[in-house]
């Protein structure tokens, strides 16, 4: 699962940011829109609800590691918190568990949920990239290319171009593959795996 390492680090950073700043961000938005009117009600209800969702997420995340029963509890958590960022993070974790169980259909289902519902572009981009890789594994090359094309966040440009290169290579469109890998290297010039893919492309193309 090495190809997911960078994205996992990005998601962990998002999780830490949400945990540390989520309440402050919601409070700031509220103050900007409504001032102090109703602050006591907001403080009692919204912050309590967020703390409850955070606790439920941590619990469901722990249960998810225990197997099928935990997977079912994770689905229940998402159903009850589908309008929160925690639901997106849980779906990403469920997708990862499904990948490790070789259940690519379930993994794709969870990632499609994130793509359709995530409000943070970084989370949505991670889901699109993972979905594209799964689609490559399933032989759905055109779908994989479409998923990679939908990633517009510049922070993920290298990963998106690398996936396109993988698709083009599988389709034996070697000129396009070379262009995609080269574009990926422009954003991540120290990536040795990318350099190897580009170097090996000539061998594959002449094979």
Image (cartoon, rainbow, N blue to C red):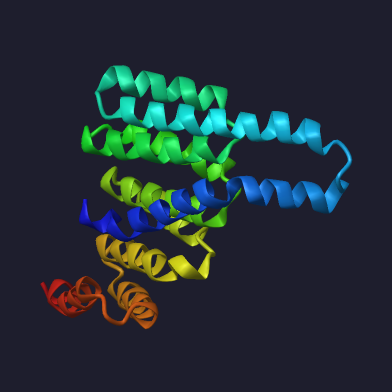
Q: Residue at x 31, y 72 (%)?
A: 177
Residue 14 x, y percent position in the rendering: 47, 53
- Is residue 142 visible from the viewing direction of this image? no
**Quarter holding the C terminus?**
bottom left
Viewer-proximal residue, 11 or 34? Answer: 34
Q: Residue at x 50, y 27 (%)?
A: 78
| Residue 110, placed above or below residue 68 | below
Q: Residue at x 71, y 30 (%)?
A: 44
- Is residue 186 visible from the viewing direction of this image? yes
Q: Quadrant of residue 7?
A: bottom left
Q: Residue at x 62, y 45 (%)?
A: 23
Viewer-proximal residue, 114 or 27? Answer: 27
Residue 160 x, y percent position in the rendering: 41, 64
Q: Is residue 142 left or right of residue 86?
A: left
Residue 120 x, y percent position in the rendering: 57, 52
Viewer-proximal residue, 151 or 122? Answer: 122
| Residue 189, placed above or below residue 74 | below
Q: Is residue 40 left or right of residue 167?
A: right
């Amino acid at each position: 699962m090495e190809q997911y390492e960078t994205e996992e680090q990005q998601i962990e950073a998002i999780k830490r940011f949400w945990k540390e700043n989520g309440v402050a961000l919601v409070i700031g938005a509220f103050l900007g829109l409504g001032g102090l009117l109703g602050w006591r009600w907001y403080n009692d209800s919204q912050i309590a609800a967020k703390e409850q969702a955070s606790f439920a997420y941590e619990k469901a995340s722990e249960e998810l590691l225990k197997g099928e029963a935990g997977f079912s509890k994770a689905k229940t958590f998402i159903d009850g918190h589908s309008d929160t960022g925690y639901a997106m993070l849980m779906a990403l974790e469920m997708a990862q568990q499904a990948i490790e169980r070789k259940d690519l259909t379930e993994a794709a289902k969870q990632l499609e949920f994130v793509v359709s519902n995530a409000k943070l572009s970084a989370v949505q981009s991670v889901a699109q990239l993972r979905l594209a890789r799964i689609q490559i594994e399933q032989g759905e090359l055109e779908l994989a290319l479409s998923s990679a094309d939908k990633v517009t966040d510049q922070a993920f440009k290298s990963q998106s171009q690398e996936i396109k290169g993988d698709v083009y290579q599988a389709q034996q469109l070697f000129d396009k593959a070379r262009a995609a890998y080269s574009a990926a290297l422009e954003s991540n010039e120290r990536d040795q795996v990318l350099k190897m893919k580009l170097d090996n492309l000539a061998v594959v193309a002449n094979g």
